Amino acid sequence: MCPMFVRHRRALALVAVPLASLAAACSDGSSVAVDDSTISSTSTTNSTSTSTTALPTTTTSTTTTSSTTTSTTSTTTTTTTTTTTEPPLAFGELDDAGLLEWPPFPLTGPLDGVAALTGLPADDDVTARAVLAVKVDNAGPARPQWALADADVIFEINVEGVTRFIAMYHSNVPAEVGPVRSGRASDLAVLAAANRPLLAWSGGNPGVTAEVRHAAGSGVLENLSALDHGGCYRREGSRRSPNNLIASTGCLYQRAAGGPARLLWTFDPEWQPPPGLAYGPDSMFDVAMDGVRVTWRWDPGLGRYLRSQSGSPHVTVGGGQVSAANVVRLHVPHAPSRIDARSPEAFTVGSGPMTLHRDGIATLGTWQRNGPYEPFSFLAGDGSEMSLRPGTTFVHVARQ
């Protein structure tokens, strides 16, 4: 029979069995459903998946006040305890203005003959191009989106009870993308890895806007907000505001140069899971994000995973289905944002458990990133690097 998957409370784990055994076990043609809340169990590995991201710290102070009344003489003692929760930082420290203090930015040159986001061959015009990172809405009224399926890389991030995407365009740039929405604190550490990308977004609350402008002033990204570059955006008449803001990519590329795209992770077309570690077939699996249930189905003919959400194929304007050669599930600490406690902030500098889905196989491991400018490292249970298949990638920044 096919392997069974059992629930484990915090981390993912998968029954560690050789691939050949799994293939034989499923030789009757049945499919194995892999769910991010139930794909679990043991692995005979030498490493553990732990998060090194600092979560909120709590300080408690106690004040005692005494008063004495004469005549009949009575004494009153009042004790007050105050508990203060300090919001965590994505990395580093805050400057005197209360903004993230960015390390000196190391702008790097273009790759030689390789598109940084896909690992596929590319000419000099592509390799010299900056990443265009667009904040795309995923609320019900925003669907279907424009050109989401054309992105080289998509990060799905939890916001307030729903999700939004950071859609990264580089080797394939459509004419328009949308609906464009506002940014969140979680975006900054992700964007910092892309070597000064162009950020297309509608704007944000004063705290997020200040952080984005500060990041731009520190050379980390190019701020192409609709508030500052309104000529590059239009409102789509068939939708209601705020779910109808469309960005012109050609216009945005004319507004700023940015830096050449660089690798966010390693690629290797020949990579396979190390023998004896945790892996198994993943013909279909679910991912739980805030407010949306996502299902991926492996299509061996296409060599891609096809995305559905809310029970239907996730298609874009024009009918193309969102798909990817790689699906990466990062299990990341979340906490209320220090900018706006109503919004969750995901911490993608640190480490934690993850699952890599490629070639119809799910492999468990650990994600690791020591600083905001560093690429993501994906480590198998034996400590070896897990590489992605060249092509497009979808990353779920899921709760840990």
Image (cartoon, rainbow, N blue to C red):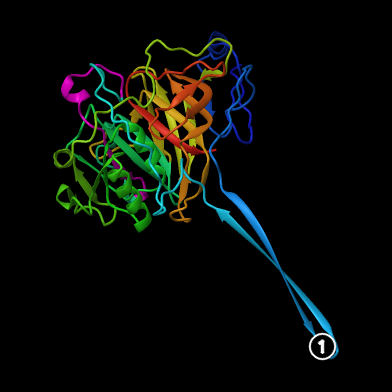
170 or 74, nearer to the observer = 74
290 or 101, nearer to the observer = 101
For residue 143, which quarter of the picture? top left
Q: Is residue 127 magenta?
A: yes
Quadrant placement of the N terminus: top right
Q: Badge 1, how many Cα within 10 Å: few under 14, some, many 20+? A: few
- In percent of the image, x 40 and y 20: which residue is there? 388
- In percent of the image, x 61 and y 35: which residue is there? 10
Q: Amino acid at mark 1?
A: Thr
The answer to whether 27 is drawn above or below residue 346 in the figure is above
- In percent of the image, x 43 and y 39: which residue is there? 311
Residue 347 position, x and y percent, is 47, 40
Query: Is 94 positioned to the left or the right of 1 in the image?
Result: left
Query: Is 112 positioned to the left or the right of 57 in the image?
Result: left
Tell me the residue that label 1 is attached to. Answer: 70
On the question of residue 32 being in view, the answer is no
Query: Is 136 positioned to the left or the right of 310 in the image?
Result: left
User: In the current view of this chain or complex, which residue is farthest to the right?
Assistant: 72
Residue 315 position, x and y percent, is 31, 37
State the count of labels.
1
The residue range painted magenta reads: 118-140
Mark 1 lies on a secondary structure that is: loop
